[in-house]
Amino acid sequence: MKSKKNYTGALVVGITGLCAAAVVALVIIVMANIASEGAPKLTWEFLTGAPTEGMTSGGIFPAIMGTFLLVVIMSIAGVPIGTITAIYLSEYASSKSVLARLIRFAVNTLAGVPAIVFGLFGLGFFVQFVGRGLDSLFTGDVELRWGQPNILWASLTMALLTLPVVIVSVEEAIRTVPRELREASLALGATKWQTIRKVVIPNSFTGILTGGILAVSRGAGEVAPILFTGAAYFLPHLPSALSDQFMELGYHVYIMATQSPDVEATRGIQYATTLVLLLLTFALNFSAIFLRYRIRKRSVA
Amino acid sequence: MTQNGLKIRTQSLSVFYGAKQAIKNVTLDIRVNDVTALIGPSGCGKSTYLRALNRMNDLIDNSRIEGKVMLDDVNIYDENVDVVELRKRVGMIFQKSNPFPKSIYDNVSYGPRINGTKNKSALDEIVERCLRHAALWDEVKDELHKSALALSGGQQQRLCIARALAVNPEVLLMDEPASALDPIATAKIEELIYQLKEYYTIVIVTHNMQQAARVSDLTAFFYLGQLIEYDETKKIFTMPKEKQTEEYITGRFG
């Protein structure tokens, strides 16, 4: 009886340990493979040059810049809206109000919508409806300027996708602002809005920053939302207006893998691009974790 | 404005948190430029009463009041009373010192600034005057731009007093202002209260019997949400009328 128990115990330890080890091994294998294949190609010229010879050689600078511009415009659009929503939810809405519950339900639903659906929504709403609408308003449908995929529509679509991330992390940061500080401000005759502006927002600033970074890292890793809304197969130049298309790292990896004219020639580029994308998202995630850690430490102290 | 030297008159005040009644039908007059101490065991409603005087209870969900709180001649719970203006007139010092994580200067100038004072020299003057009134100026005058969080507990509490003074209140509500401080810092706060009553009407909640006896002119004893006895501090501590008061101040319960 006793020995049987021991066997079961050992078996459970073995299986759980094996599964855990498999996860770690998977990460190591993926990383090692990408790093070893991609690193040799990762030169200064690669990072700062444009693709050449039908994208079988050259660099990925337009894709890096495109990704950068995408997340910047996305943040400008998404972080304020997300922050304001979080402020409304945590400061103004009573937790039991129907409206607050509705907003929370919407945020949770938004977080669960597949990225490709956002892409289709962006195409249908921003490109076809808003863009075409603007075109017919200003040029009478003569010129197609906004009614086609571009970096603005792609960024706005991405902003929608990352909105729940921003809302949740800002709300969490706002909740760590001690009640005592709000009371101190209100007792000095500050209005609720003055208290939010002078006490709540400054004291949750790192949280807002974390929300922004997490949104950026999520956004930088998604391809589906920009597939139909602005990403370009190949552009040797950088976007110069909001109505321009752009290259993007994730999308670049995707087309290199599926639509390359010469698979063997592009393999190195593909690995190196993937490595750059991974390093970028890791760096963003780690800075978000670091900032969060600092907030947590403060709220405990 | 003030009637018969009375600053605040609470009339049949009851405060409810949801279904629970925290204050039961309290009628109490607070004299101008005197220190009124509120004493009683934990949960007796003295802090709730204090917070009713500048409507801080409004911030708590499900709180509700009945009765009146007359500040001078106006019921502060009247519909047309601006709660923001009320809180400028009735300042509050909290149990746990709560300076903003800003500089000493920015803490004291917070109130004047939100009221629209932008002039640098005017703010400088207010900061110095209030820090002097709070007996903190000499200790911090050379480091006004240092973080307030670097100050000791007692200094932080005096900073909070200076911050409250900066909006020119008429009444100061103090919710156990010295309960987290060591005896020396406590003595300084008590001395300060004694000096401040020349200009302000002070209401102080305290757990410390000796403190109530030392700093206050009048003492109100609360028990289970009711006002049991209210009289000159001397009388309360030497010959209380009620048996419960006597038992509490002699330490037989509480």
Image (spheres, rainbow, N blue to C red):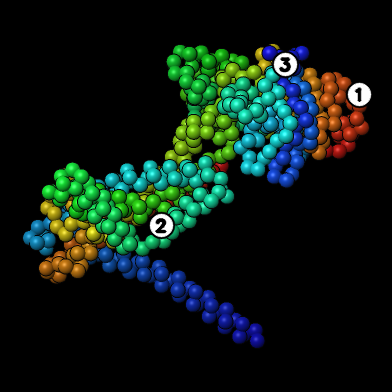
Q: Same chain for marks 3 and 2?
A: no
Residue at mark 3 to residue at mark 1: CA–CA distance: 24 Å
Tell me which amino acid carries mark 3.
Val
Residue topped by disc 3: B32
Residue at mark 3 to residue at mark 2: CA–CA distance: 58 Å
Residue at mark 1 to residue at mark 2: CA–CA distance: 69 Å
Q: Chain of mark 3?
A: B
Q: Which numbered disc, 1 or 2, marks the residue closer to the eye?
A: 2
* Residue A15 place in picture, x, y as percent: 49, 77
Q: Residue at x 91, y 30 (%)?
A: B242
Q: Same chain for marks 3 and 1?
A: yes
Tell me which amino acid carries mark 1.
Met
Q: Nearer the viewer, residue B243 or A65?
A: B243
Q: Which mark is residue B239?
A: 1
Q: Which mark is residue A110?
A: 2
Tell me which amino acid carries mark 2.
Leu
Q: Helix, strand, or loop for circle 2?
A: helix
Residue B203 found in image quarter: top right
Q: How many marks?
A: 3
Residue B39 found in image quarter: top right
Q: Nearer the viewer, residue A287 or B217?
A: B217
Q: Is residue A241 above or below residue B223?
A: below
